[in-house]
Amino acid sequence: MTVFLLREDLNFPPAELADEDGLLAVGGDLSEKRILIAYKNGIFPWYNCQPILWWSPPKRPVIFPRFFNMSKSLFQTLKKNKYNVSFDRNFIDVINACASVPRKNSTGTWLTSEMIEAYVKLHKLGYAHSVEVWFNKKLVGGLYGVSIGKAFFGESMFTTMSNASKVATACLVEFLIQNAFYFIDCQVTNSHLLSLGAIELPRAVFLKILNEAVQKQSLLGEWKRNNDSTYHTALFLKEKLIKRKIRYATDSF
């Protein structure tokens, strides 16, 4: 097993050299330039304490926007306008909630103060974006991630009310379809992401799609929704989403 030590230069070893668990390198820093270079090469930071660990898993879960799985219950929630949804209205509160709201079957958080500071800087530069879900003017769910070219790298989500994080994802998917994004990179597979339509791609396949996506023109700056309502999101997704049979990506390649 070889794990590379990063130094002051911003170069990364090829993602294909990661170990069997996906660990590629340790060290370096969380400067904006280093993080952006990492994402463009299929690498992301994920750690609980120093040193910084950089990963590129052998199987990469992604959601292709038009293959997002909108359940009947989610469709009804969107139609009822139970929640209002905004983009980039309160990035800091979203990322702090992602770090602090308890998660099922999980203890602690990988979102250290150093990580939060790094992504807040990326937000100010127009690369990192948040989706906020509101109920009675209270923030009850949301997500954040990084956008480069036509790729969206999902980082974390939170919810304090039923379906709030799914509503956030649905509204993000609507925006990504409207703007011809290739995929949402989900980084690490779990059952929740699979239920939303994520499929696992072999690293080599993911890197090929990624390379094309990040070369497209980026939507830098603040993202906005035309309407806080979710009713039209429900109708839009019902028309645009493609139904598919669930199958493992490794069966196709």
Image (cartoon, rainbow, N blue to C red):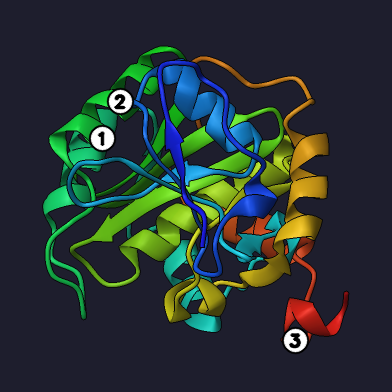
Q: Position of residue 79 (x, y in %)?
A: 49, 64
**Mark 1 lies on residue:** 115
Residue 53, relative to residue 235: is it above or below? above
Disc 3 to disc 1, C-alpha distance: 34 Å
Q: Residues within 10 Å of mark 2 (few under 14, many from 20)?
A: some
Q: Position of residue 68 (x, y in %)?
A: 65, 66
Disc 2, SS: helix
Amino acid type shown at disc 2:
Ala
Q: Quadrant of residue 141?
A: bottom left
- Estimate the x, y position of residue 60 in percent, counting from the top left: 62, 63
Dot 3, crowdedness within 10 Å: few (<14), some or many (≥20)?
few
Choose the circle earlier in sequence order: 3 or 2: 2
Q: Quick one: SS at disc 3?
A: loop
Residue 58, labelled with which disc? none
Q: Which residue is mark 2?
A: 118
Q: Amino acid at mark 1?
A: Met
Which of the two discs, 3 and 1, sits closer to the camera?
Answer: 1
Q: Is residue 8 left or right of residue 115?
A: right
User: In the image, what residue occupies the spot 47% across and 63% down?
Assistant: 78
Amino acid under disc 3: Arg
**Residue position marked by numbered label 3 in the rendering:** 247
> Which residue is found at the position 57% from the left and 55% from the top?
18
Q: Is residue 87 left or right of residue 96?
A: right
